[in-house]
Amino acid sequence: MKKLIIASLTAMFVLTGCNTFKGLGQDVSSAGNAVTGGAQDVQDKI
């Protein structure tokens, strides 16, 4: 019984971590797109 509980908790933490990193990756990607768009606007004005 203890092994089942430990395995369940471990799986929960692993899956939660994956979702967290996926969200972080999306945030970083959005920030990169914003910087790229800003740089493109400046280049167009020059």
Image (tube, grey):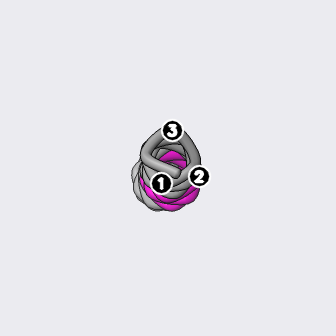
Picture coordinates of residue 8 (x, y %)? 55, 54
The residue segment tinted magenta is 15-25
Badge 2 element: helix
Per the image, the residue denoted by label 1 is 5
Toward which corner of the image does residue 27 lie, by quadrant? Answer: bottom left
Viewer-nearest residue: 15 or 44: 15
| Residue at x-position 44% and y-position 53% | 9
The local crowd at label 2, few if under 14, some if 14 to 19, many if 20 or more residues have their Cα within 10 Å, is: few
The local crowd at label 3, few if under 14, some if 14 to 19, many if 20 or more residues have their Cα within 10 Å, is: few
Viewer-nearest residue: 20 or 37: 20
Picture coordinates of residue 14 (x, y %)? 51, 43
| Residue at x-position 51% and y-position 61% | 23
Q: Is residue 33 in sight in this rendering?
A: no
Disc number placed over residue 29 in the picture, else none:
none
Amino acid found under the numbered disc labelled 3: Lys
Q: Earlier in the sequence, mark 2 or mark 1?
A: 1
| Residue at x-position 44% and y-position 56% | 20
Per the image, the residue denoted by label 3 is 3
Answer whether residue 36 is magenta in the image.
no
Amino acid found under the numbered disc labelled 1: Ile
Q: Main secondary structure of the magenta part?
A: helix
Q: Earlier in the sequence, mark 3 or mark 2?
A: 3
- Check the image and report above or below for 32 versus 23: above
- Check the image and report above or below for 41 versus 17: below
Per the image, the residue denoted by label 2 is 15
